Amino acid sequence: MKVWSDRRIIDNKAPLDSFSYPLHYGGPAVWEGMRAYVQEDGSCKIFRLKEHVQRLRDSSKIIGYNIPYSNAEIEQACEALVQQNGNKDLYLRPIAYLNVDAESIHGIQTKDLKLDIYCVPIPKLHRNSEKGIRMVVSNVIRAYPQFTMQAKTPANYADITQVQPLLDQTGVQDAFLLDNQGYVVEATVANFFVVKGDVIMTPPNKGSILPGITRRTVAEVLGDSALMFSKYKKVPRVVEKDITKADLYTADCVFLCGTYAEVVKVSEIDGRAIDGDDSYFRIIQTEYSNVVRGRK
Ligand code: PMP
């Protein structure tokens, strides 16, 4: 797969430099994950490209560094890269990082980040989206509400390292994380929704979650009462609410959402089956796929 690196498209990824500053200090770096989808008309389009590039920009502002390219340049680079890689379903990962050695700790000279954009085929997820995935609620607390949580920056992903031993022990596919008050706020790399009757709940953004672009798309689709009524004769109420473990255990249906995972049903949480009415999940599965593929 070809890589975009400082205005050039090159054949291979850069080898990992183990003496690089971001690897030693968990940043400064910011990144995005987006997907290109082949559309109904045969063209290929990056889903919510502008929003992702803007979030990359916002992330860099939050951590106080600069990406020395305009949003338009980054968008064009992503599109050119998808084209170079064959205009098919792809996952894109732009990463902007401080390109200096770890020894620079006492004297960083620049606020400008280097930008590379990677592009990889999307592996078939071993998660069975029909049956759903098994999860546990971990006791890992998402980084304390603070402004850097709103940035997609490597330091925020230290949670994954904390959660991995629990996944290994329990054999489940993912875990929920808590905020500092004990509410359940996110999965490791995805937001989530909880369905109870016609109410669909998701945790509010109080500084402990990454407010996902997929989360917003799901809320827009399910909140489109004209669409929901005309096509499905069901109109849910989508609300932001602090979610407790009890809300999860007693839900009709729980599903994760994120760019990589898209929408994935959860079949079991802490050994309790979540097996009630999943019709809203099936609706969003269909409608999400329609939106990303440009189908009406
Ligand atoms: N939370 C975290 C921590 C994530 O890494 C992601 C994936 N980017 C999400 C939520 C979902 O965000 P999005 O829908 O924008 O991919």
Image: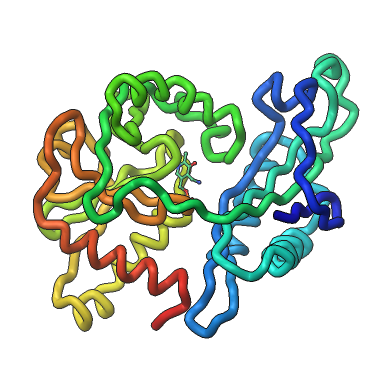
Residue 114 placement: quadrant:
top right
Residue 48 placement: quadrant:
bottom right
**At which x and y percent is residue 33?**
57, 50
Q: Residue at x 14, y 77 (%)?
A: 233
Quadrant, the N terminus: bottom right
Is 127 positioned to the left or the right of 195 in the image? right
Tell me: residue 200, above or below residue 138.
below
Quadrant, the C terminus: bottom left
**At which x and y percent is residue 188?**
42, 35
Tell me: residue 271, above or below residue 165.
below
Is 230 positioned to the left or the right of 129 in the image? left
Residue 87 placement: quadrant:
bottom right
Q: Residue at x 20, y 62 (%)?
A: 280
Q: Residue at x 26, y 79 (%)?
A: 226
Q: Residue at x 40, y 24 (%)?
A: 163
**At which x and y percent is residue 21?**
77, 24
Tell me: residue 15, above or below residue 287.
above
Residue closest to the eye, 185 or 85? 85
Coloring scheme used: rainbow
Tally the marks.
Answer: 0
**At which x and y percent is residue 173?**
33, 35
Outermost residue to the right: 109
Is 78 positioned to the left or the right of 69 in the image? left
